[in-house]
Image (tube, coloured by chain):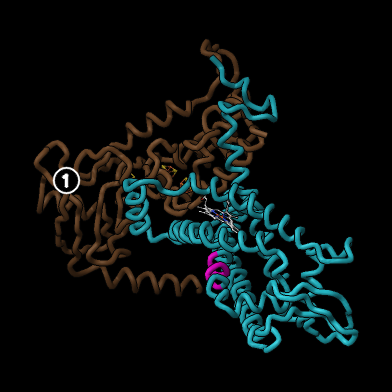
Chain colours: A cyan, B brown
Amino acid sequence: MSRLDTVGDTLVLAPGDRRWPAWLDLLQGLSGLLLVLFMWAHLFAVSSILLGKPAMYRVTRFFEGSLFFDTPQPWLVSLVALFIFVIFVLHTLLALRKLPSGYRQWRAWLVHMGGMRHEETSLWLVQVITGLVLMFFATAHLLELFLHPSNIGPHASAARIASGGWVLGLVLLLSVEVHAGIGLYRLIVKWGWFGLVDTAARRRRLRRFVYALVAFFLLLGVTTQMAYLRIGKESAVRDGLRYVPPGSAQIVPPLSDEAPLRISQTGEEVKR
Amino acid sequence: MSEDEILARDTAVHGAATSGEFTLEVLRCNPADPEDRPRWQSFTLELTEGMTLFIALTELRETQDPSLQFDFVCRAGICGSCAMLINGRPGLACRTLIADLPSPTRLAPLPGFALIGDLSVDTGRWMRGMSERLETWVHGLDTERDPARLEAPMEPEVAEAIYELERCIECGCCIAACGTAQMREDFVGAVGLNKLARFHLDPRDARDDGAYFDLVGDDDGVFGCMSLLGCDDVCPKDLPLGTQIAFLRRRMARQAL
Ligand code: HEM
Ligand code: SF4
Ligand code: SF4
Ligand code: FES
């Protein structure tokens, strides 16, 4: 009996459809790629603080819908966080299929890796470990953003990072950038993009390029964290005052649930 | 580096190690004897000019231990019998110069295949099983052949591309070098995927992508491969395994869409 007839005839995958493995592999790569691109864009957005508080403020407001709304709409941030979370969960579930399971597979893998002394084989373990770190820590981070979407801004973010958030920040930065770099490399050789898988020399060059990229993002991330730490030490931030762009008069919700703030025409922050 | 410099360096390296003593540690085990436990056994031998691992093992068997088991046929990297783990990495004993190895060097049988004894494994049974599963033969040829009829001609480029992939000697190095194959027994490995890529090229094979999908469109096939490319880096015939696997993956993914 031919099983051919179930291949390629519909787009809807029934539970027994033999196209599942292909789809899962495609989705794993696609979700990984989306996450990589998002994480890079995200780091660029966060690092806008290096250009000063006004720049970071504008970026924050942009993600709160400043193009379409007059007042900040933090639920937009929640929405994005939710979307990323769904992709993230999807990718995690798909990637977990590939993890060694049980003693026998782990031992086979580790013995194999130790003997091979092969860069790409070892990188895969790094990918598994950073992935597992992300599974726990990025979930915590995303949940926090989802629950407190308005807690983003030059002061609010700095306050979070200065009050111990930098530990989680550094763990996330290191694991996400390393994981994203190796993942991107893997995608390129896996699907043979740009012919880069064709020779060992090209693969080596691609690896060096990816390492440089990872180093760049790590440096950018660490510099950014240091900028937030510095701001977090300022007295206004310690007093729990929100950042207010110069020259604006508006009511801004405070960092905590204390009384709201009134902002004077000159941009000073006044507690009511 | 200029040719002369490379030559000078190579002579220096090889020259330095063509004399003196060399230690080989061999993982011994005789599965036919239920009492026997795997153990490392150390052998010391005198180096000679141009000595390969195969020559060294033969000398050990002739002069030190006649019970030492290992395979060889061609001694020239053609038959694929002599693959083993050399300091943890798969390679052909007949194509490995002792001078390129550190002393002591550890030899172990290829993992992932049935052990016959010491360094000898049954790659043949594995390869046959894989070939039957993947149906690695030309499909759709008339079984009734008319010897008087001319064969259909083939473009020289196509013939050459097929020949390039046909060079696989089924040594099993790519299976021993593959983390996926070591973890998951049913994975067809680079050798299997390369074979299907070869028949995919062949205009005489009547199978379409749907038929290939039936054979490798799952996690024991191309979608199980995690692209660690150990296979590509150890293949003694330098087959473009990474390229072929990526090609199959794209074709099979398109087939599923
Ligand atoms: C923001 C977070 C993440 C990003 C940017 C990311 C990115 C990527 C990319 C691009 C790939 C290559 C995809 C492929 O080979 O098809 C990949 C693979 C992988 N990811 Fe992630 N990932 C993230 C989170 C995670 C998490 C939470 C896990 C949890 C265990 C994980 C585990 C893995 C594993 C094990 C692989 C290798 C899969 C394979 O070899 O087939 N990743 N990741
Ligand atoms: S593909 Fe290369 S390593 Fe694998 S069996 Fe063939 S010749 Fe050996
Ligand atoms: S690319 Fe990696 S996982 Fe795929 S067959 Fe080669 S060694 Fe195995
Ligand atoms: S003896 Fe034939 S390949 Fe080594």
Q: Quadrant of the C terminus of chain A?
A: bottom right
Q: Is residue A172 within the magenta segment? A: yes
Which image quadrant is residue A157 in? bottom right
Specify the segment rendered in magenta. Answer: A170-175
Q: Is residue B74 within the magenta segment? A: no
**Chain hosting mark 1:** B
Residue B204 can be seen, yes or no: no
Which image quadrant is residue A261 in? bottom right
Q: Nearer the viewer, residue A7 or B241?
A: A7
Q: How many marks?
A: 1
Q: Nearer the viewer, residue A62 or B109?
A: A62
Q: Residue B210: image x %, image y %?
A: 61, 26
Residue B50 can be seen, yes or no: yes
Q: Residue at x 31, y 41 (%)?
A: B81
Ligand 4 appears in which quadrant? top left
Q: Nearer the viewer, residue A156 or A62?
A: A156
Q: List the single residue furthest toward the bottom.
A: A235
Q: Nearer the viewer, residue A70 or A262?
A: A262
Q: Residue B30: image x %, image y %?
A: 15, 42
Q: Residue A206: image x %, image y %?
A: 59, 63
- Does dot 1 land on a helix, a strand or a loop? loop
Judged left or right of residue B105, residue A16 is: right
Up/down of A51 relative to B152, above or below? below
Residue where numbered disc 1 is placed:
B29
Judged left or right of residue A178, residue A152 is: right
Judged left or right of residue B67, residue A171 is: right
Q: Residue at x 86, y 66 (%)?
A: A71
Q: Residue at x 55, y 73 (%)?
A: A170
Provide the major secondary structure of the magenta segment. helix
Q: Residues within 10 Å of mark 1 (few under 14, many from 20)?
A: many
Q: Residue B26: image x %, image y %?
A: 19, 54
Q: Name the kind of residue labelled 1 in the image.
A: Cys
